[in-house]
Image: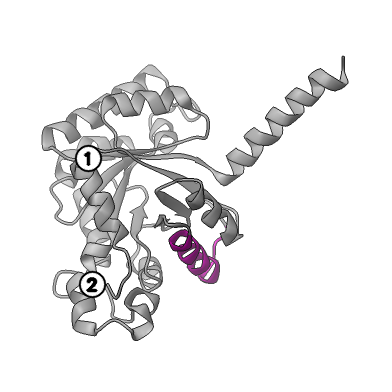
Amino acid sequence: MNGRVNRAELIRQKLAAGEVVIGGHTFYMDPAITEALACHGFEFIWIDGEHSAFDKQSTLTHIMAAASGGAASIFRVPWNDPVLVKPILEMGPDGIIFPMICTREDAEKAVKSCQYPPKGVRGFGPRRANGYGAIDTKKYLEEAESTLLKIVQIEHIDAVHNLPEILKVQGIDLPLVGPNDLSASIGHLGDTRHPEVIKLYEEIIRICKEAGRPFGVSLGAGDHESIKYWIEKGATFIGCGDDISYISMGSKSTFEFLSTVINK
């Protein structure tokens, strides 16, 4: 639209072709971090509005920073509430992640919050989303839905049981597994490789493959075993670590090396 890259559609095309799309998460307030992650090659930046201190102003700057670095901006709202979703949509992100979607009704509510009437309940008031008015309104409305990925997180055992129905909701681009909360829902918080948790992964994977749907997962930085597992299982939308973890990993690595030199 108006010369802007439709990154949501580019990601859809890659997913349809079975190609893997890799992203990174950001929690820190400085938008330069989001831009840096994009410059280093992450195809999408997961801007976390659920477990961070982002306000509306900082969210906008991170969405702009992701675009500057050439990555899609995917914002996770703190909850599945149209009131929380609406102002983010006006900022023109490339996607929205809805946490803790457990039923078909949850998924329908999420999708409708991203769609204008008569399909949905989104109020009209685009700002950056329509190029601050530079995009013709008719053209904007024709293309608005195609420029936004709608992702639902599967992070509770109830969601696994209801996944076949969730996937029937029109407008969902993909389900995305949240291992930590999923493991917590069956009493294994912190043990995302527990055999009972793995069984849930396998069930999610089976359902998605039978439905012919792409699926994704959010993973920690440096968790190479899990990254390998999910790629081998067919996941094509993968969040691999976050800014806090990357700083932690680099710091630990440096001090581990220093201890071998200083203590010689």
**Label 2 secondary element:** loop
Indicate left or right for 146 with 5 as reference: left
Q: How is the image coloured?
A: one colour
Q: Nearer the viewer, residue 260 or 88?
A: 260
Q: Nearer the viewer, mark 1 or mark 2?
A: 1
**Label 1 secondary element:** loop
Q: Which residue is mark 2?
A: 121
Q: Can see residue 50?
A: no
| Magenta region, residue range | 53-68
Give the residue drawn at x 15%, y 52%: 169
Confirm whether the magenta stretch covers residue 54. Answer: yes
Residue 250 percent across, percent down from the top left: 66, 35
Give the residue drawn at x 14%, y 55%: 170
Q: Residues within 10 Å of mark 2 (few under 14, many from 20)?
A: some
Give the residue drawn at x 29%, y 57%: 8
Task: Identify residue type, mark 1.
Answer: Pro
Quadrant (top left, top right, bottom left, bottom right) of the N terminus: bottom left
Q: Which mark is residue 214?
A: 1
